[in-house]
Amino acid sequence: MVTQRNTSSHRIDEAVSLLSKEKLDPRPVSWSDERLLVTQRNPPSKIIAKLEETGIVQRLVVPSHVAQLASREFQNEKSVVRVGTAEIGARKIVVIAGPCSVERWDQLLEAARAAKRAGASLLRGGVFKPRTSPYEFQGLGEPGLRLLAKASGETGLPVVTEILEPGKVKLVAKYADMFQIGARNAQNFSLLKAVGKSRKPVLLKRGMMMTIDEWLQAAEYILLEGNPNVVLCERGIRTFEKATRNTLDLAAVAVLRRQTHLPVLVDPSHATGSRDLVAPMAKAAVAAGADGLMIETHPSPESALSDPHQQLNLEEFGKLMEELDPVAKAVGRAIR
Ligand code: PEP
Ligand code: MN
């Protein structure tokens, strides 16, 4: 329920107590300049009638699916999430490029400059790395965050980086423009709530075992804290197929367009795990209606400390951006 703009806190409290008596677990949420009351289930008609009598109801939303705040019933118009100078969900395809891991200053700066030159809108780079093996490179930690902020200053590109624990929200927020929740943490509900409490944009990747409905419900955890700046990122799911690292579910892009107003990106790097498959899947993603791409790039991928097989070298990335241009135009979008 969206409340009338002039509703006093006292009237909201009355509505909360009415809904609580019905065990609807009402949650007041500040949503941009509006105040919402979100309930666990749709209230019965007699309660709706009572609320309408009080005159505080501006709009009642009855979602038909698992999502409430992410649903198209709540907001039909597509969301545009602003990250620094980038607008995710607008006409321009937003490309996020940069290394899997921040390793050294010269490596990051070279990748950042190439990203900027080729027309990318954001710089990526992991500093807290969720590695499968504890014996693999775990990331530079805070010194890596400082390098990201410096590279952002040099190029003007806003930065996105993965956060692994709720206790690091303040630290990461100090240096980055956008939080990334990785596939392995996509259902870490305390982490989702923690980034929801911040108002910084969040890139929520799809968990490797998550259905689209579960993914949308993970997004609800962030939105319900009052952070409307959520962007979804399809990065492939686990299936029986072994030829690719994961199975890229491009139909998810079209399904999400039907179900949510949130912008949707595609990460063909982690989805395929293989350098030569990144370009064809990036083009397919743009054709399918993705609002942008996340692509791993490295000045010398063969020597990368993580994901050496899937990162594009800087020349390959520049070439891919050229090739994406006509694909974007064909679907009414633009790459630059
Ligand atoms: C990443 O983008 O750095 C990453 C680890 O991806 P994912 O969470 O999709 O595996
Ligand atoms: Mn990676």
Image (cartoon, grey):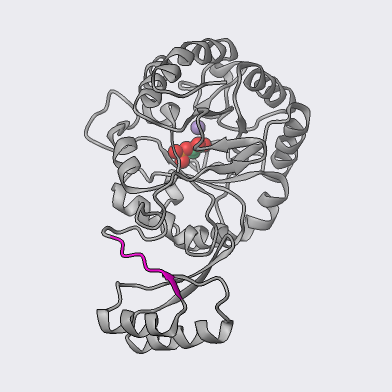
Eyeballing the image, is 155 above or below 231? above
Residue 93 percent coordinates (x, y): 50, 27
Q: Quadrant of residue 62?
A: bottom left
Is 214 one of the magenta-colored residues?
A: no
Residue 258 in the image: state x and y as whole percent.
30, 43
- State the residue at coordinates (49%, 58%): 192
Q: Is 59 a magenta residue?
A: yes
Please give the name of the residue rendered at 28% of the width and 34% of the height, measured from the top-left corner: 251
Q: Is residue 215 above or below residue 189?
A: above
Residue in front for this viewpoint, 186 or 105: 186
Q: Residue at x 41, y 27 (%)?
A: 268
Q: In terms of depth relative to the viewer, which is nearer, 312 or 132?
A: 312
Left or right for 46, reference 92: left
Looking at the image, which residue sits at the far left?
240
Would you say 334 lies left or right of 244 here?
Answer: right
Which of the two residues, 101 or 11, is positioned nearer the viewer here?
A: 11
The magenta region covers: 57-63
Q: Is residue 237 visible?
A: no
